[in-house]
Amino acid sequence: MSTVEIYTDGACRGNPGPGGWAALLSVEGREKEIAGAEARTTNNRMELTAVIRALESLRRPVSARVFTDSQYVRRGITEWVTAWKARGWLTADRKPVKNQDLWQRLEELAAAHRIEWRWVPGHAGVPGNERVDRLANQAIEALLR
């Protein structure tokens, strides 16, 4: 089974403000770019949306490496979500988990695949990450035109 490499990023102008998301999926030399934008959102929502849209675009269960510059996304899905669910979607200080709708969707989608979650530093010259950053910002620009 081939491994799909997925780079994702979200961007926001203001927080909240207009935001964009993007993903680059590559497998066996083939690549697919996807991107979109929302008029009023947050950076964290766009980071989550990028991963969700990437996983939604997969046609069958796969082995994947997801690269994100968001510790919120990586740690949320690998560490925090189990405790949030056990507490009825409350944080450790008993406040409602932000973006619960997106966390639930991401968890549902991720369950269908074998995913290795990798953090990469943002704006540090990682080619895939730089590419999705540009795409997410281009999506915002297109929305604002």
Image (tube, rainbow, N blue to C red):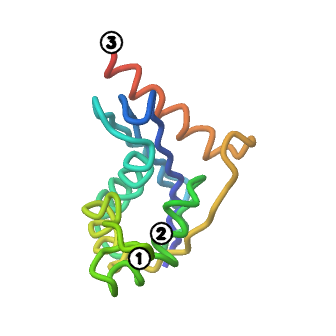
Q: Is residue 32 left or right of residue 122?
A: left
Percent coordinates x, y for residue 67 in the rendering:
57, 59
Q: Amino acid at mark 3?
A: Arg
- Point out the frontmost of discs 3 and 1: 1
For the residue pair 96 and 46, the one nearer the viewer reads as 96
For image coordinates 31% across by 57% down, the residue present is 57
Mark 2 lies on a secondary structure that is helix
Determine contact: label 1, label 2, CB under 8 Å: yes
Which labelled disc corresponds to residue 145? 3
Residue farthest bottom in this picture: 86
Quadrant of the rendered structure where residue 129 is?
top right
Relative to 130, say whether 50 is above or below. below
Percent coordinates x, y for residue 21 in the rendering:
41, 41
Few, some or many residues within 10 Å of mark 3 (<14, 14–19, 20+): few
Relative to 55, say whether 90 is above or below. below
Determine contact: label 3, label 1, CB under 8 Å: no
Relative to 45, say whether 130 is above or below. above
For the residue pair 28 and 126, the one nearer the viewer reads as 126
Q: Amino acid at mark 1?
A: Val
**Residue of label 1:** 81
For image coordinates 53% across by 63% down, the residue present is 66
Q: Is residue 58 left or right of residue 22?
A: left
Few, some or many residues within 10 Å of mark 1 (<14, 14–19, 20+): many
- Point out the frontmost of discs 3 and 2: 2
**Residue of label 2:** 76
Mark 3 lies on a secondary structure that is loop
Marks 3 and 2 sit apart, C-alpha to C-alpha, by: 34 Å
Residue farthest right in this picture: 124
Q: Amino acid at mark 2?
A: Gly
Percent coordinates x, y for residue 105 in the rendering:
27, 66
Q: Quadrant of the C terminus?
A: top left
- Of labels 3 and 1, earlier in sequence is 1
